[in-house]
Image (cartoon, rainbow, N blue to C red):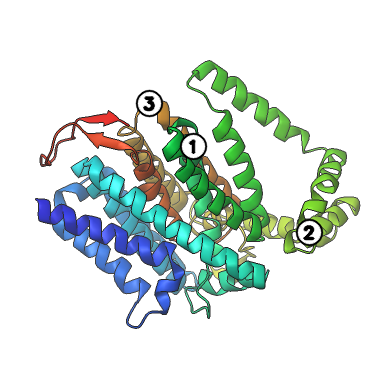
Amino acid sequence: MKARQNMLTGAVLAVGLVTLVPMVRTLPLVSVGVIVFAALILTCFLFPQAMVNKESFLFLIYALYIAGSLYFKGFLVKNQLVNLVYWGMALCLANALLYLKNKLIFKTVAWGCLGMVVVTCIFTSQQVLIDPSVVRSGGIVEADFGESPLKVAGYAFAHGVPLLFPYLVYWVKKSDFKIKAIWVFVLGAVSFFILKANFGASLIVSFFCILLSFLITSDKTLNIVLLVTMMLVAALFLNKSIVLSSLQLVEPFFEETVIANKISDIKGSIIASGVEGSVYNRGALYLGSWKAFLGSPLFGVTYRGDAFIGGHSFVLDNLAIGGLSGFSLLVLIIWGMFKRLILIIDKNKRIYFLISLSVFVILNCVKANIGGGSLFILFVVVPALSFAHYKPNIKGVVRGEQLEITQY
């Protein structure tokens, strides 16, 4: 059993390496697809009993349904198949970790993946200072699972690491002074990368995620009041005047960056009543996917040429392609895994996992391809972070049983 646990830990870290450290992909004989697929097969072979559950069964149906829909409706299948393999791998690894309930493995994964994230953020931030467009240009290539000269973090990474912020903030708040310095450094490195990555959606979501995570307390009633207050504040931004004033307030902080250009473009779109600029363009893309979905809501569009699909929202695009029949399966899978994972996390930390899930959902609503690695981060890395400072009371591992744990 110990050998199988070590092999599982190695598989998780190997996937983390090719997902969170793009520089590794430049090494000879390193293939992301091969490593991800190998991790999937190895995990199923080592822990077949862990795969026998509702979520695994639903995923098989979903994968066959989506692959068939894409093929028979004339869509390109390759990229989506890569994502399906990535999602299947994340599901298998999470199933195995849930079966073992070994918090020491979670702890190893947490620190190993954190180290990878910090290395990537530092390396990429250094390159960004030289060339501000390097992340965006690298991201476009990386989103297509291609080659990138510097192998800096790109589109998928920039929209995946915001999921880590809730637990990074939690440990900054809860750790003692000596350990707090480590967490402040990690939070600072990732925050600086997000700030310099020049992706507006990732930056905005990250800001509110960090703010909310800092404000969350152990008092449930206070947390509810806080969430309602933030929703009311967010509702204020439906007013054009407030949006314009806010944009003018933050614009000086992003001078000579891509974000500044975006802010200027958004202001122009609002002043022109949404008939030009990026707000209009993205609105048209979202509306195209929504209309395609409404044309055939149950099973999606009949054929690719029958409707316009915007290609800028994973949620809307998948509703248009697979309809409610396919998308509801994916929702059931993600929600089912979330409920299983959250039960192994201490009650006082569960709300942070909920915030991570919310970030995942929001980014998938406004972005079309944040990469298959985002589900690996949500199902494996984020839960692992909740055990970063846990120590077992007993030595050894009991097969299939949860170790007694004391909080650091």
| Quadrant placement of the C terminus | top left
Amino acid on which disc 2 is placed: Ala
Q: CA distance from mark 1 to mark 2?
A: 30 Å
**Could you say where residue 322 lies in the image, as x and y percent from the top left?**
48, 57
Of 404 and 351, the residue lying toward us: 404
Q: Residue at x 42, y 39 (%)?
A: 179
Q: Earlier in the sequence, mark 2 or mark 3?
A: 2
Q: Residue at x 18, y 59 (%)?
A: 7
Q: Earlier in the sequence, mark 1 or mark 3?
A: 1
Please tell me how crowded label 1 is: few (under 14), some (14-19), or many (20+) other residues with Cα within 10 Å: many
Q: Are marks 1 and 2 in contact (CB under 8 Å)?
A: no
**Is disc 2 placed on a helix, strand or loop?**
helix
**Is disc 1 placed on a helix, strand or loop?**
helix
Of tags 1 and 2, the one toward the viewer is: 1
Q: CA distance from mark 1 to mark 3?
A: 18 Å
**Is disc 3 placed on a helix, strand or loop?**
helix
